[in-house]
Image (cartoon, coloured by chain):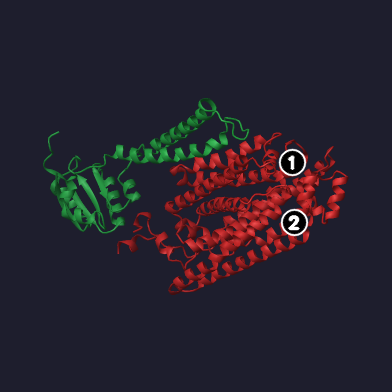
Chain colours: A green, B red
């Protein structure tokens, strides 16, 4: 794909998470759909405000966990019953209470790994470049104490002048235009 | 400031809403109906051939009711102390219900006195106060050699004098903490905001050692009141199992109470979804800890191949009890675990209340599995008798009366503490947590 050119969007900076969430709610209500919020730490309400939909990470986590547990339990059963049966103090070779602990550990391990790698696979990280890095105030504040709302140029409602006025109405600290 | 303009206002009247009276009346009616039922069942069970155990079952079920209500009273006190040590906004929602739970201790003491008075019908060791009496009982075949040895060996701890005085000492200690923390809770609210740091430190300093003392006293109580029903068995994790069970049931009840109160002011204003979600997660932790310890105890005894200890489990697995322990596993762990795993459920008031109510039932069900197989007529032999229905009638009656008492205590104080640094935070919209 050839590199995109032109305006990526308009970026409004806010001082508090509360201001960001209210601005995002307003923009979503006014029909904006190509928009995103950026904050130094997770602000769940901001995600909800812009209509963030469910993702598949919980499902991946569940499947990973069940697979891990089933795999370890089967492995133990296979070893103890078929491959190398040992008489341990007269207990049956299929001693499920003893199998429960490693199977549980593998459930946790695989659930955790599936969640972590599933998250990376679904959200496109690691990403080396993002147009917003072009905005100096974003570079300075996005990781520490500033909250940003970006209305993107891909949205059909986007208009460089009108949108700027619209964002300025929300009393942000600043509104800057960001290029690709 | 953007913050201030969007914060909610506390209502002027912070006292408990009138719906608590409705709960109290309903609980009292249920309590009385089931109490009558329990007495009828006792006579029916007494008349039933060949066991004639109606009143014995009544007393065993009474002990179950005692353990559950005691779990709420003393567990509530302990959770209050945990909250004072840990801090956190969830405490603002739970503290007053927890205080009310702890103040039901006098009723629990009355319940306990009944168990203590009839201890000879519940505890084998209470019938044999001397070495001579056990030797005679072995000759007539009333007890086995093992039981004789165990009763004689454990007599320094398991005798009626120690039972009475250790229990009374424990009650005295809990009563002291109950009185002290409840008194200071009110005093704290009467003071101005400049005293907040002082109160946080002071309550923390009382609660820290209090928790250590609670762990010891509740271990002693659970050993005397339940574990010693089977003189042949011991487990060092037993007290801890009850401790976790108390956290489990106290949080479940706390959630039910707080979410039900949130239909009306003042809790409506202070309950946010964030803290509701947090309470759900906290409860989930106890669900996991509980299965970890119960299964751990079983696994250790099972892998150690301990001939003495394993009988306790065999009494509770064979002869039909396998069904009960399977259901116990499903009720006490599988259902709460799978339900509370869901984020949406934890944020849904109605469903979270349902799950928590079910968890309280599961606690009582688990106690049934712990208590009934201690007795020779029931060990490895789950069978129907009129008396077994006492396990429904008596605990429901005792719980009904307990809930009525709890509601009465809950009404006594405003439901929101004002001298708390978290109050301002909890009144803000959720996204403003900076």
Secondary structure under tag 1 reads: helix
B144 or A90: nearer the eye?
Answer: A90
* Residue on which disc 1 sits: B388
Residue B228 visible in the shown view: yes
| Classed neighbour count for the residue bearing mark 1: other residues with Cα under 10 Å, few (<14), some (14–19), many (≥20) | many
- In this rendering, the answer to whether B387 lies above or below B223 is above
**Quarter occupied by residue B325:** top right
Q: Residue at x 19, y 50 (%)?
A: A11
Q: Which mark is residue B158?
A: 2
Secondary structure under tag 2 reads: loop
- In this rendering, the answer to whether A174 lies above or below B345 is below
Q: Residue at x 62, y 45 (%)?
A: B361
Q: Where is residue A65 shown, x and y percent of the image?
A: 44, 36
Q: Nearer the viewer, mark 2 or mark 1?
A: 2
Please report, as a chain letter, where disc 1 is located. Answer: B
Q: CA distance from mark 2 to mark 1?
A: 27 Å
Q: Earlier in the sequence, mark 2 or mark 1?
A: 2
- Which image quadrant: the C terminus of chain A? top left
- Which image quadrant: the N terminus of chain A? top left
B135 or A104: nearer the eye?
Answer: B135
Q: Where is residue B132 shown, x and y percent of the image?
A: 86, 54
**Quarter occupied by residue B401:** bottom right
Q: Residue at x 75, y 50 (%)?
A: B150
């Amino acid at each position: 794909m050839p590199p995109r050119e032109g305006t990526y969007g308009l970026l409004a900076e806010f001082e508090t998470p509360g201001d960001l969430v209210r601005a995002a709610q307003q923009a979503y209500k006014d029909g904006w759909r190509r928009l995103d919020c950026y904050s130094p730490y997770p602000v769940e309400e901001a995600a909800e405000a812009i209509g963030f939909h469910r993702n598949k990470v919980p499902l991946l986590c569940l499947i990973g966990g069940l697979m891990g547990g089933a795999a370890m339990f089967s492995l133990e059963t296979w070893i103890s019953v078929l491959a190398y049966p040992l008489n341990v103090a007269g207990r049956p070779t299929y001693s499920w209470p003893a199998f429960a602990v490693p199977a549980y550990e593998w459930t946790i391990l695989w659930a955790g790994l599936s969640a972590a790698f599933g998250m990376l696979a679904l959200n496109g990280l690691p990403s080396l470049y993002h147009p917003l890095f072009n905005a100096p105030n974003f570079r300075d504040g996005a990781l520490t104490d500033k909250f940003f709302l970006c209305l993107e140029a891909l949205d059909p409602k986007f208009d460089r002048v009108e949108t700027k006025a619209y964002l300025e109405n929300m009393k942000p600290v600043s509104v800057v235009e960001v290029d690709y | 400031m953007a913050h201030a303009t969007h914060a909610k206002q506390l209502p002027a009247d912070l006292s408990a809403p009138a719906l608590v009276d409705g709960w109290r009346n309903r609980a009292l009616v249920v309590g009385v109906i089931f109490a009558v039922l329990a007495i009828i069942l006792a006579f029916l069970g007494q008349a039933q051939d060949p066991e004639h155990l109606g009143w014995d079952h009544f007393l065993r079920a009474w002990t179950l009711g005692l353990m559950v209500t005691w779990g709420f009273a003393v567990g509530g006190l302990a959770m209050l102390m945990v909250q004072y040590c840990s801090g956190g906004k969830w405490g603002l929602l739970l503290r007053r219900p927890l205080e009310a739970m702890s103040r039901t201790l006098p009723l629990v003491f009355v319940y306990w006195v009944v168990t203590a008075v009839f201890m000879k019908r519940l505890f084998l060791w209470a019938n044999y106060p001397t070495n001579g009496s056990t030797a005679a009982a072995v000759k007539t075949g009333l007890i086995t050699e093992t039981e004789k040895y165990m009763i004689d060996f454990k007599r320094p701890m398991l005798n009626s004098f120690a039972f009475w005085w250790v229990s009374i000492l424990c009650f005295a200690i809990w009563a002291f903490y109950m009185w002290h923390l409840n008194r200071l809770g009110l005093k704290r609210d009467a003071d101005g905001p400049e005293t907040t740091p002082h109160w946080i430190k002071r309550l923390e300093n009382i609660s820290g050692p209090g928790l250590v003392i609670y762990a010891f006293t509740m271990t002693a109580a659970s050993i005397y009141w339940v574990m010693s029903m089977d003189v042949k068995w011991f487990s060092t994790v037993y007290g801890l199992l009850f401790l976790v069970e108390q956290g489990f049931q106290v949080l479940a009840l706390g959630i039910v109470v707080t979410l039900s109160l949130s239909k009306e002011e003042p809790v409506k204003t202070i309950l946010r979804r964030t803290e509701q979600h947090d309470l759900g997660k906290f409860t989930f932790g106890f669900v996991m800890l509980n299965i970890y310890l119960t299964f751990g105890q079983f696994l250790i005894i099972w892998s150690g191949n301990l001939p003495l200890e394993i009988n306790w489990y065999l009494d509770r697995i064979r002869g039909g009890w396998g069904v009960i322990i399977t259901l116990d596993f499903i009720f006490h762990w599988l259902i709460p675990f799978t339900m509370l795993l869901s984020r949406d459920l934890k944020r849904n008031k109605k469903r979270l209340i349902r799950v928590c109510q079910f968890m309280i039932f599961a606690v009582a069900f688990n106690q049934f599995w712990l208590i009934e197989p201690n007795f020779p007529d029931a060990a490895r032999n789950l069978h129907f008798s009129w008396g077994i229905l006492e396990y429904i009638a008596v605990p429901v009656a005792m719980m009904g009366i307990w809930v009525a008492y709890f509601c009465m205590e809950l009404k006594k104080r405003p439901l929101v503490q004002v001298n708390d640094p978290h109050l301002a935070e909890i009144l803000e919209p959720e996204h403003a947590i900076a």
